[in-house]
């Protein structure tokens, strides 16, 4: 089993920045790709960015050039640096990972990001 705990969500003005963190615990050695997803009441949960065990990253087109995902395996933590935030980035952001051996997926509880003036 893997547990994920997100933090860092906040209210920020358009153009501002935030850094989200997600700490993993439990069966750390089983963690595979880690990622961030986001969801609003009007939309399904969508992928934002992912980082593989080897450090390869991928981004949704809507955040390319503004968001950066990174992981610190020594701290069992994945980060999402969000710059040039827009009102349409407002959502609950969820951390995700899957089990390297079984591909079972795990989710954090979510952290609210609100971009508004």
Image (cartoon, rainbow, N blue to C red):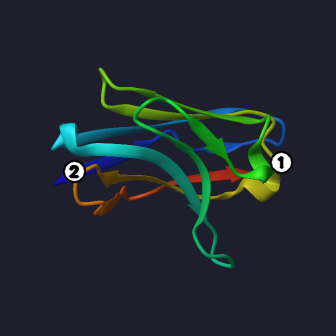
Check the image and report above or below for 50 versus 89.
above
Pointer 1 with pointer 2, Cβ within 8 A: no
Q: In this rendering, is residue 106 above or below 68? A: below
x and y percent of residue 69 in the render?
A: 57, 34
| Left or right of 96, for residue 14 | right
Quadrant of res 6: top left
1 or 2: mark nearer the eye: 2
Q: Residue at x 67, y 45 (%)?
A: 59
Look at mark 2 in the image and give the residue it sits on.
Answer: 2
Q: Residue furthest bottom?
A: 42
In three-dimensional space, the C-alpha distance between marks 1 and 2, rounded to whole angstroms, equals 37 Å
Q: Position of residue 72 (x, y in %)?
A: 40, 24
Q: Which residue is mark 1?
A: 117
In the rendered structure, find residue 24 and report the number of the disc placed on it: none
Instruction: Say what secondary structure mark 1 lies in.
Output: loop
Which is more toward the observer, 18 or 106? 106
Place residue 27 in its image quadrant. top left
Which residue occupies the foreground of this view, 18 or 32?
Answer: 32
Q: Quadrant of the N terminus?
A: bottom left
């Amino acid at each position: 089993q893997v547990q994920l705990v997100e933090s860092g969500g906040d209210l920020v003005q358009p153009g501002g920045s935030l850094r989200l963190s997600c700490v993993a615990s439990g069966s750390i050695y089983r963690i595979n790709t880690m990622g961030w997803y986001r969801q609003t009441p009007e939309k399904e949960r969508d992928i934002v960015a992912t980082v593989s065990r080897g450090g390869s990253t991928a981004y949704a087109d809507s955040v390319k050039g503004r968001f950066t995902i990174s992981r610190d395996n020594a701290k069992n933590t994945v980060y999402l640096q969000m710059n040039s935030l827009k009102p349409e980035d407002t959502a609950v952001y969820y951390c995700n990972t899957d089990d390297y051996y079984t591909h079972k997926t795990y989710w954090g509880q979510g952290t609210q990001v609100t971009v508004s003036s």
